[in-house]
Image (cartoon, rainbow, N blue to C red):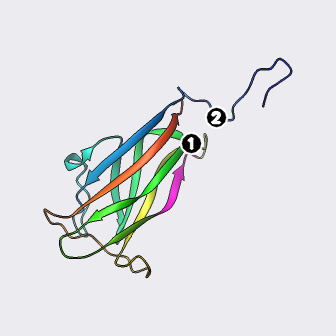
Amino acid sequence: MPDKRGVTFYDKQSRNREAKDIELTFFPQGSGAVVNDNNIGNGATIERTDVGKFTVTFDKPFNAVIVKNPDVMHATLVLHARVISKQTDSVTGACTGFTFQVYTSAVSATAADVAAAATSAITIKATGLNTVYS
């Protein structure tokens, strides 16, 4: 909102005005931890937090993030994934990541792990808007 001098103040300060695309493919290990050193792409790390549930943490926080539902590749099953929450910094309000859940069906809410196999992978895509001062 402009003040009397016509200067506009934004509620969050940005390092720069930009849009950064984050695309990352990782290889779930069934019920085991994700090995982030094997990820293809960069900009985030992945952690398995429950059955079929993964938390994505961005390398840098963003003022806003547009997240697409992840793509799940599996040799024998048709699995679906959807974003269930975004994480925000309690001080700045910036988006620091998101959580998504893998399901056995697009309709039912049955959580499923992705088996550790050479053909199993999950690709996440997000667009971060305006990196935040750290």
Report the span colored magenta: 83-89
**Front one among 27 and 50:** 27
Q: Which residue appears at 25% of the width and 49% of the height?
A: 36
User: Dot 2: within a 10 Å radius of its alpha carbon, few (fewer than 14), some, or many (20 or more) residues?
Assistant: some
Where does the N terminus fall, quadrant-wise? top right
Q: Which residue appears at 57% of the width and 29% of the height?
A: 14
- Was residue 130 drawn as part of the magenta stretch in this picture? no
**Front one among 88 and 3:** 3
Left or right, 16 with respect to 46, comes to right
User: Dot 1: within a 10 Å radius of its alpha carbon, few (fewer than 14), some, or many (20 or more) residues?
Assistant: many
Q: Of callouts 2 and 1, which one flags the residue occurring earlier in the amino acid sequence? A: 2
Q: Magenta stretch: dominant SS?
A: strand
Counting from the top left corner in percent of width and height, residue 113 is at 29, 72
For residue 15, the mark is none
Q: Which residue appears at 48% of the width and 41% of the height?
A: 128
Q: Which residue appears at 53% of the width and 34% of the height?
A: 130
Image quadrant in which you'd find residue 117: bottom left
Question: Tag 2's secondary structure?
Answer: loop
For residue 12, the mark is 2
What amino acid type should be assigned to the residue bearing mark 2? Lys
What amino acid type should be assigned to the residue bearing mark 1? Ala
**Front one among 37 and 78:** 78
Residue at which label 1 appears: 94
Q: Is residue 7 above or below residue 87?
A: above
